[in-house]
Image (spheres, helix red, strand yellow):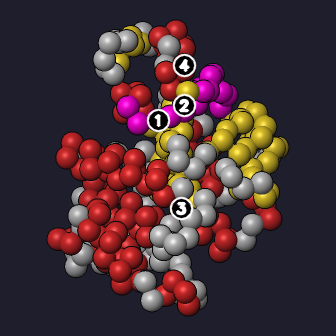
Amino acid sequence: MTIKSHGISLLINGEKIISHLDLEIIPGEITAILGPNGAGKSTALKILAGDIQPSYGDVKYNNINLSEISIVERARLRSVMSQSQTVAFDFTTLEIIEMGWIHENNESYSFSYSDALEEIINICDLHSLLLRRFNTLSGGEQKRVNFARILLQLWIPKTDNYSRYLLLDEPFTNLDIFHELKMLKIIKSYLSKNIGILIVLHDLNVARKLADNVTLMRDGRTIRQGPTDEVFQEDLLSKTFNTCVKVNDTSPKITFF
């Protein structure tokens, strides 16, 4: 069971922003979308999330057309972390995290709320920030809080195991090295929970280390997609980023100049 797009294209004012994108997110695997600025990466993620309706093509969640899935049910199947999120009101960090809980009307889950909340706060190491006002936090701290919120959204008891999906748009922006590595570790750990992950990245070295599959995009088009080692070829990367890219076959290090 997967999220799968087929031939999705998006036109805005006659300009083609996305062109014939086929993409699949598989539970237990990480798919990365890479490309230069303006390639259409974030737009593709928004289409797969259901936030933007494509002009052509379709998106299916577990073989069901996304247009036939209610907003409430989408929230159970996938959570989305955007590049940035503006919060107009003066909520605390704890209140922002709690917004991820979507099981208030589910009697079988409601008794687990406190345990689920504490579990996510511990995983993300956020106890020291809980009483802080969200809008007073640094950019990196806000990233960590929003990450906790989307993890709480996808929480289900261990006795349940249906497919779910994390859609992450540049999740490591503004993070220091310690918290980037911590988030990387958490993301990898969620693969064992029957969760498929789509992640938009700029960092080629992180993508090579993290992703099972890669889609390279440029100007709204797919340059190449497939297993990471097959896609990470010097000619493909250099063409995509219009920069000389060197792939070190004896180490995970990628250089460019």
Tell whether label 2 touches label 1 (CB within 8 Å). Answer: yes
| Residue at the disc numbered 3 | 79
- Give me the C-alpha separation between circle 1 and circle 3: 19 Å
Tell whether label 2 touches label 3 (CB within 8 Å). Answer: no
Which of pointers 2 and 4 lies earlier in the amino acid sequence?
2
- Give me the C-alpha separation between circle 1 and circle 2: 7 Å
Amino acid at pointer 2: Val
- Can you see residue 244? yes
Amino acid at pointer 4: Glu
Q: Residue at x 49, y 87 (%)?
A: 110
Amino acid at pointer 3: Ser
Tell whether label 1 touches label 4 (CB within 8 Å). Answer: no
- Give me the C-alpha separation between circle 3 and circle 2: 20 Å
Relative horizontal placement of residue 257, taking residue 223 as reference (left or right):
left
Q: Secondary structure at mark 1?
A: loop
| Residue at the disc numbered 1 | 211
Indicate the position of residue 100 as horizontal and vertical percent values.
46, 73
| Residue at the disc numbered 4 | 230
Which of pointers 4 and 1 lies earlier in the amino acid sequence?
1
